[in-house]
Structures are given as C-alpha cells and as structure tokens.
Amino acid sequence: MTVSSETTPGQVAPGQPTPEQTASRGLSAGLTLLFAITCGAVVANIYYVQPLLADIAATFQVGMGTAGMLVTVTQVGYALGLLLVVPLGDTHNRKRLILTLLALCIVLLLAAAASPGFLIFAAASLGVGVLSCAAQVAVPFAASLAPDHSRGRTVGTVMSGLILGILLARTIAGAIAHYAGWRAVYIAAAVVMTVLGALLARALPADPVRPSIPYGRLMASVLHLARTDAVLRWRSLMGALGFAGFSVLWTGLTFVLSDAPYHFDQATIGLFGLAGLAGALAASRAGRLADRGHAHAATGLFAAACLAAWGLMALTHWSLIALTAGILLLDIGVQGLQITNQSVIYAGNHGARGRVTTVYLTTYFVGGACGSAVASLAWDLGGWVAVSATGGAVALALLGSWLLAHARREEV
C-alpha cells in the first residue's frame, strides 16, 4: 500500500503503536456474530420501505410517484451519514457513538410508525437513513478489534451479515406488513434496535482514547486520504464499478421479468433476491483469501466472475436457468469484491478507518446510482440486450482496472 509521507490527522506515525494495539485483542466469535447481526439489522432499516410503498401511498393518500421518493430520501440520508457522521468514528468513542446512533434511530423509527402525515414520515425516513450509518461505524470498529492475521475473515463475516440484512429486509417487511400493517414494520424495527443496543452496551469493549481533531480538519483529512492513498483510490474505483454492475442488474431485472416471455408478478420477482443469499454466503470466504495474502488474485477472480455472469445473463430471454445462475455468479463476484476491498483498505490507516470507509463507500454508492440510471436508459433504448451489454461493459471496465493495476505493479 502506498503511504504518504504526510501523516493524515488521526493516523499513527510510523513506529508508534496504534490505539487498537493497546486494546484487548480477543475478538470472540460471539462478538463477531453480534457485529454481523447489528450491521444487518441496522442497514435493513433503509430498505424496509421499498415493498411498503403502495400501502404507505394509500394511507397518506399520495400518488405512487410521490411515495416512491421515500426510497431516494432514505438513501440520501444514508449517504449523508456516510459522509458526515462515519468519520467521527476516528476521533470519538465508537462504542458510545454506535449506541447514540441506535438510540436516536429508535426514536425516529417510532416517529415513522406514528406519522400522521406524509411529510413527517418522509422526514423520519431521512433521519433513519442518516442514523443507519451506525452499521458503517461498526464495520471498521470490528476490523480494529480483530488480530491482523484474521482481520479479513472478521470483515467477511461482518459484511456478510450486512449483505444478508439488505437482501432480507424487503422480504421481512412484506411479511410483517401483510399480517400487521406497514406501521408494525417500524415498531418491530425499533424493538430490534432496542434489543441490539442493550446487547452492545454489555458486549462491546471499551474503545481506546484517540487524538481529538476539530471537525473541519477531520473532514479535510478525508480529502487528503483520497488524494494520497493510491490503494484506497484503486479499491474505491473497483468497488464503484462492481456496485454499478450490481445496480444495472437489479434495476433491469424487474423490467425483463415483468415483460414477455415471463410476465412475473412483483412477489415472484422478489424471490430472485434469494439467489443473492447464496452469493453472500459464498463470498464471505473472500476475507480469508485476503488474510492469506491473495487479495490481488481474488480481486481478478471476482472481476472475471462478474464478466462471466453477464455472459450467462445475456441468454435470459431463452433460459431462466441461465438468468438465475448469472444472478448467483454476479452476487458472488460483487460481494466477494466488496469484502476483499474492505479487508485491504482496513489493513492500513489504523487511525483513519472511519474516513477510509467514507471515501470508499461514498464512491461505491455514486457508482451504484450511475448504474441504476444507465440501466433504465439502456432498457428504453434496447431492452434486455442493451442492459446486458451495459452490464458487460461495466464488468469489462472492472476487469480492465484490475489488469491495469496488475500491469503497473500497483499494490492493490
């Protein structure tokens, strides 16, 4: 990893012990599992609204287009949390920060459940999105507590929990709403956050004291990291391309499955997300490859898997089996790449993992937003053939980025 001669505020000078090295290193399997469950449950808060839009629109007597903006509002909140809150994990007590974010999230989840009008619900959704960044405070915290020889495995386990939370949120919300109404979804989420908060308050170790940095200087150091850390830039680029391809798939998938020859309803289309569960479980081993020094080779393998997946899915109109296999392979590629990326970027920057997370995930979500936009345009221009070509082009750019880094002998 390329190291700047200038020490980023909050980083530890060469030869000096990191705060984590002064902390207890005994990250147990139980605590790792608790981190994984926490990340999955917290990030699920962002996605509960998606299957509830029709019911929410009916309750507040607004159009589906207006209700659909709730998805964007919640994700904008999450992006703001990544940008403005996650860096605080480098200078504040992370245990206290996570518990504070969860406590505020409980309040806003209950406010969403009790909302008398659409605007109040939208405001609560924005706040829930911001506070759900607690998941991305927890990931670098877990990475910091893990011993060097198993950090990748720890990140893989925690990230698998987060991915499962994303994949299962829509199914869980739909099931609860079917039996108890959409407001019960947010009450149940608040209960889950309360239980997790109580468990984390007892289980999380004390966080080492770190240097205090004024907020303005802290945010300036985020830009400094992006400028000076070549590994972070490469990994952010590859993460953005991976998530762009993922977004191309899941944006275009609804179009193709609801069109001829399938004509599936929304419930059936939602079942295709279950293929992602297998992908998440398979990709969780990516962290072990990083621990063994194979992160660079694993990145090329996962990039190649993404490209091969789009080759399979180009046959969608003729084979549902090819589509399902392609979804599974793309999930393995994208999620394996994500875990490998975060394992690598957390291996350095001991005092700046929160800011590293901000740089990486902000770039990551920009890639996803671009992928969704391009997929919609591609469908309008040429249907699934154009969507498949777009996804394949993104995967080719991903593999090309890895090959370029390999040719230049960059340490990525």
Image (cartoon, helix red, strand yellow):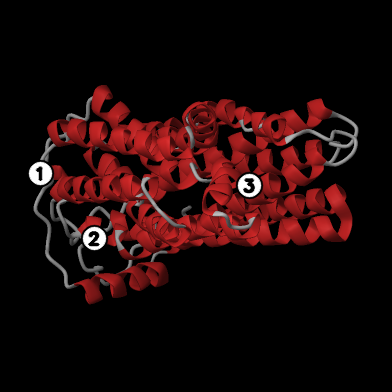
**On the image, numbered disc 1 is attached to which residue?**
22
Q: Which mark is residue 246?
A: 3
Indicate the position of residue 165 as horizontal and vertical percent values: 45, 35
Q: Residues within 10 Å of mark 1 (few under 14, many from 20)?
A: few
Q: Residue at x 52, y 56 (%)?
A: 70
- Upstream in sequence: badge 3 or badge 2: 2
Indicate the position of residue 191 as horizontal and vertical percent values: 29, 33
Q: Is residue 383 above or below residue 224?
A: above
Tell me the kind of residue under disc 3. Answer: Phe
Where disc 2 sits, the SS reads helix
Alpha carbons under labels 3 and 2: distance apart:
29 Å
Q: Residue at x 58, y 30 (%)?
A: 279
Q: Which mark is residue 88?
A: 2
- Upstream in sequence: badge 2 or badge 1: 1
Tell me the mark number nearer the camera, choosing from 2 and 1: 2
Residue 126 visible in the displayed image: yes
Tell me the kind of residue under disc 1. Answer: Thr
Quadrant for the N terminus, please. bottom left
Where disc 3 sits, the SS reads helix
Is residue 112 toward the left or the right of residue 57 in the image?
left
Q: Is residue 73 above or below residue 201?
A: below
